[in-house]
Image (cartoon, rainbow, N blue to C red):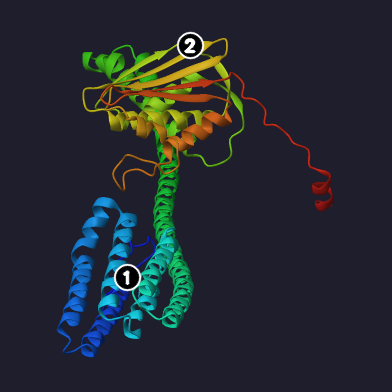
């Protein structure tokens, strides 16, 4: 007879658990209705009344509750369900003359009167019992029967409410633990992925280090035979110039071919020297150097990456500055190689140097594809790269940023998609000395 509550699913409530509770509640109500029908078998008017009430309440619970909840909310729906239960209880009770079997519906219904998180559930429970008791006593019900089932209903509700609270607590705790485990699994998977990436990049860095050592060794091996070649060509040119009777062919060699050959040899020697100095792994001290000379050295090293571009130099005669020249060359090579990668054939790369009252200014500008705001935000982060897998480690610009900062300088980037990129570096003429912090008293004691 009772329409059992279809409470709004709580956030922590599993759907299968809610449906299982509703099934049990429906079976219990059906069993009580069958018992009433059996008790009044042959009294057709009473049976018809009981069955009618049961059908109306069942149809309401099965067909209308979900629709009302979606339209009006669960508060209004539960109020309507309570009202129908009261009316059904009163109609059935009056028809059956309030026999104890009818009163059983009241404590049974309150077993399910436990909307978790519903602040109006107790008000509905009290309204339900008061209205039923008042009408039952006014229509001939026995006082002791009404009192007994009312007390039973109150304690049924109290036990049910406590049980529901404990159940919700267990469910929420279980779901909280499950969410914590899922989060831990996600964090572990992410950490594992990051470790794999770090391992891969470490392997790539080791390869680059090995290639640097190999380049330094090759440059060293080339340097020795090139010394002989340079000396011999110089000697041959000098001896031929001392000869008085040279044929026209030999004069052409003396005037054009051999000087051009010496220029080429000098360029090879310069590239070899740049490679040897650039690949050297020993620590570098601060020293005075000509910045424009180091720019020329960087351009020679990066020449192979810029062959498809027009290279423009605007060196302003910066003169001598103090710093680590190998590191400055490394900065310029990284910027030039990146510019060559980002700029299609026919584009241009410009290198500009200037000196002002605050220090020196270097700019590497290209006409390449440019960068988005998102890329610029992460540009100097370690391992960030826009190159395909296997073509970049994401460490170049991070190293550049660290070198410039160690020289007391600043680096800024200006770029828009499709508009090229400009890196502007400002360096002091003399880097600031590192700050010294004297050890604390505790450090002195620990150090002996």
Instruction: Say the numbered circle drawn on residue 18.
Output: 1
Task: State whether residue 232 appears in this view.
Answer: no
Depth order, front residue of 313/226: 313
Q: 19 and 203: which one is in front? A: 19
Image point 22% across, 13% down: which residue?
Answer: 248
Image location (x, y in percent) of residue 219? 42, 39
Residue 150: % across, % down:
44, 76
Residue at point 46%, 19% (across, down): 362
Q: Earlier in the sequence, mark 1 or mark 2?
A: 1
- Report x, y in % for residue 276: 46, 36
Which mark is nearer the camera, 1 or 2?
1
Q: Nearer the viewer, residue 339 or 22?
A: 22
> Element type at marker 1?
helix
Q: Which residue is mark 2?
A: 317
Per the model, the C-alpha gap separating discs 1 and 2 is: 82 Å
Taking the spot 30% from the left edge, 16% from the top edge, the residue there is 254
Q: Residue at x 25, y 87 (%)?
A: 35
Neighbor class of circle 2 (other Cα within 10 Å; few <14, some 14-19, many 20+) is few
């Amino acid at each position: 007879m009772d329409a059992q509550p279809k409470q709004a699913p709580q956030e922590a409530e599993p759907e299968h658990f809610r449906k299982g509770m509703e099934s049990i509640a429906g079976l219990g109500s059906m069993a009580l209705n069958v018992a009433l029908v059996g008790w009044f078998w042959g009294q057709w008017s009473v049976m018809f009344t009981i069955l009618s009430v049961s059908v109306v309440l069942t149809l309401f619970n099965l067909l209308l509750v979900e629709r009302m909840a979606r339209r009006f909310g669960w508060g209004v729906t539960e109020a309507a369900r309570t009202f129908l239960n009261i009316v059904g209880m009163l109609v059935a009770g009056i028809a059956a003359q309030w026999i104890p079997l009818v009163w059983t519906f009241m404590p049974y219904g309150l077993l399910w009167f436990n909307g978790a998180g519903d602040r109006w559930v107790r008000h509905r429970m009290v309204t339900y019992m008061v209205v039923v008791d008042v009408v039952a006593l006014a229509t001939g019900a026995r006082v002791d029967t009404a009192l007994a089932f009312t007390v039973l209903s109150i304690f049924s509700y109290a036990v049910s409410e406590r049980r529901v609270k404990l159940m919700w607590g267990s469910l929420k705790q279980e779901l909280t633990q499950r969410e914590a485990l899922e989060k831990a699994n996600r964090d572990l998977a992410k950490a594992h992925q990051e470790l794999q990436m770090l391992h891969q990049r470490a392997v790539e860095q080791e390869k680059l280090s090995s290639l640097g050592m190999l380049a330094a060794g090759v440059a060293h091996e080339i340097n020795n035979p090139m010394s002989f070649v340079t000396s011999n060509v110089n000697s041959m040119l000098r001896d031929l110039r001392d000869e008085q009777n040279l044929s026209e062919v030999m004069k052409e060699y003396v005037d054009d071919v051999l000087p051009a050959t010496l220029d080429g040899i000098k360029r090879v020697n310069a590239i070899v020297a740049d490679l040897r100095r650039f690949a050297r792994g020993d620590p570098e001290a601060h020293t005075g150097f000509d910045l424009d000379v180091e720019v020329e050295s960087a351009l020679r090293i990066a020449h192979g990456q810029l062959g498809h571009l027009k290279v423009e130099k605007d060196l302003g005669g910066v003169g001598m500055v103090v710093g680590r020249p190998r590191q400055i060359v490394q900065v310029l090579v990284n910027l030039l190689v990146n510019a060559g990668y980002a700029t299609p054939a026919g584009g241009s790369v410009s290198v500009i140097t200037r000196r002002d009252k605050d220090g020196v200014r270097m700019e590497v500008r290209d006409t390449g594809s440019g960068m988005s705001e998102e890329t610029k935000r992460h540009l100097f982060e370690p391992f960030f790269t826009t190159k395909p897998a296997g073509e970049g480690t994401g460490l170049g610009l991070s190293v550049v940023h660290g070198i410039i900062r160690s020289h007391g300088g600043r680096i800024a980037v200006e770029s828009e998609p499709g508009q090229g990129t400009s890196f502007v570096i400002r360096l002091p003429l003399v880097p600031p000395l590192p700050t010294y912090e004297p050890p604390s008293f505790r450090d002195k004691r620990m150090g002996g």
